[in-house]
Image (spheres, grey):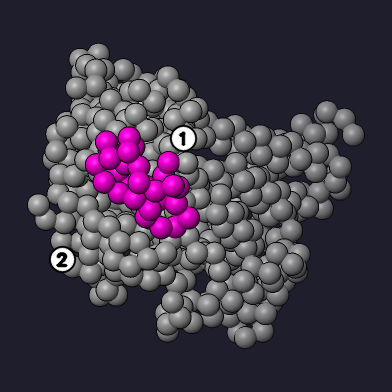
Amino acid sequence: MTNVIEIKNLSKSFGSHEVLRDVNFSVKKGEVVCLIGSSGSGKSTLLRCVNLLETPSGGNIIYNGENILDSKHNVEQYRTHLGMVFQQFNLFNNLNVIDNCTVGQQKVLKRSKAEAIEKAMKYLEVVGMAQYKNAKPRQLSGGQKQRVAIARALAMDPDVMLFDEPTSALDPEMVGEVLKVMRMLASQGNTMLIVTHEMEFAREVADRIVFMDKGVIVEEGHPDQVLVNPQHERTKEFLKRTLKS
Amino acid sequence: MNLETIISILQNSWPMFLRGAYMTLAIAVISTIIGAFIGFFIGIMHTIPMKSLSLKTVLLKIGNFLLTCYVEIFRGTPMIVQAMVVFYGLYAYGIELNRFVAALVVVGLNTGAYMAEIVRGGIVSVDKGQYEAAQAIGMNHVQTMIYVVLPQVARNILPATGNQLIMNIKDSAVLSVISVAELFFQTKSVGGANFKYAESFLIASIMYLIMTFTATRLLRVMERRLDGPNAYKVDKESEGQIQ
């Protein structure tokens, strides 16, 4: 299996505060990787560095063999290969559901309107939101918004899907519907990088779990290994705290 | 002051009032539109992200400085003074502006100065997540602005723009100092001819009120139109199940 994304010696500082230190890791094609760790451990920042919503302070990001931090590299073009799902959904407030899913296809990928709508409807059906195609974001519940956001990202046909705590802003009863969609995507062989606090979910879908603490990767491996039989003291401590609640 | 006098003034001079009202409305509407364009231009210029130091950012900074000067000058001086300076200033250089054009220039530039701040505020208040989502699907800054941010700004600043329109309907009265034949100027002429100033201006004030009130209502309707219906049609044919 080839690496889709490879991160080498990545560091990120906000002012004098070092959020990421010398992070190395990679995502293989078809792999589902879950990033876990306590708040402030840098996992969200790492995810945001992957699609350059945060500019890394140092290191390299290699995508399909190309260094995308090279100044000559087209950032916008690179981002179309990554689908991003945000904690706060971030649907475009001025557009209805279907337009949310077609605007990127039409304006960035230059697809025809008919093609964009067909693709959007396909993925809206996948996430069970096709019947709400004319609704505005403000008319939807959190879970519905997040499912539309997933469809919007999928409609761009990305190589990798990035999820930044996709269920953290949801009411408990809506977490299930979003996780259900994500489980299905994972089972269909999509490459996914997920920042999550849902340990049960991570254990179930992840091919690999990466535990981060204080800006470094402490431990990574198969879910059974990291979650059931952690090797590091910090991982054990974290799991004890999260699994208790 | 009695009703009979008012009716007789209207009978004798209604075309002058109507022409004045028409002129007032034309100046207010056109210059609000001009001002909105200026405001959007400056608001956008002021919010272009400047990452690295290059020739482009230096030029942008100089441009923004000049635009800020313009905003401060036009917000910081009375419109009546601006009208005198623009009209007689240009006249001194041998340029005799059509009075209507001069009116549009003065009120337009004045509105633009206020709208610049309104638009900037509107852009800044759009949630950061909207920019990030647009960037994440590969939009560049221009696309993000056109398809995501500015439509939201336009909707959000509509009430403030309406306010500007209403102010322009009223404040265009000061243009009588450069003899623009708007409602105030016309009313003064009517009053000067019949020596019934109070009655004539009572008529004018009612006409101003009708214009501003109508404008307010029309803008409300426009706001509601832009928001679209509160209900949406659920497409019964497609299933709501997660596949």
Residue A78, percent from left and from top? 24, 60
Q: In which quarter of the image is residue A8?
A: bottom left
Residue at the disc numbered 1: A240
Secondary structure type for disc 1: helix
- Give the left or right position of residue A85, taking residue B193 as reference: left
Q: Which amino acid does label 2 sit on?
A: Gly
Q: How crowded is mark 2: few (under 14 residues within 10 Å), some or many (20 or more)?
A: few
Residue drawn at 17 percent across, 32 percent down: A187
Question: Is residue A191 among the parts visible in the rendering?
Answer: yes
**In the depicted view, which residue is nearer to us: A241 or A6?**
A241
Tell me, yes or no, whether the highlighted magenta stretch contains residue A23.
no
**Residues in magenta?**
A209-236
- The quarter of the image holding the C terminus of chain B is top left
Q: Where is residue A155 in the image (x, y as percent from the top left)?
A: 21, 40
Q: Mark 2 points at which residue?
A: A65
Query: What is the chain letter for disc 1?
Result: A
| Vertical relation: A81 (above or below) B46 | above
**Viewer-side residue, A236 vs A92:** A236
Residue B216 disc label: none
Residue at 78% across / 52% down in the picture? B188
Q: Residue shown at 23%/69% (left/top)? A: A67
Q: Can residue A157 be seen in this view?
A: no
Q: Nearer the viewer, residue A167 or B98?
A: A167
Label 1 environment density (alpha carbons within 10 Å; few <14, some 14–19, many ≥20): few
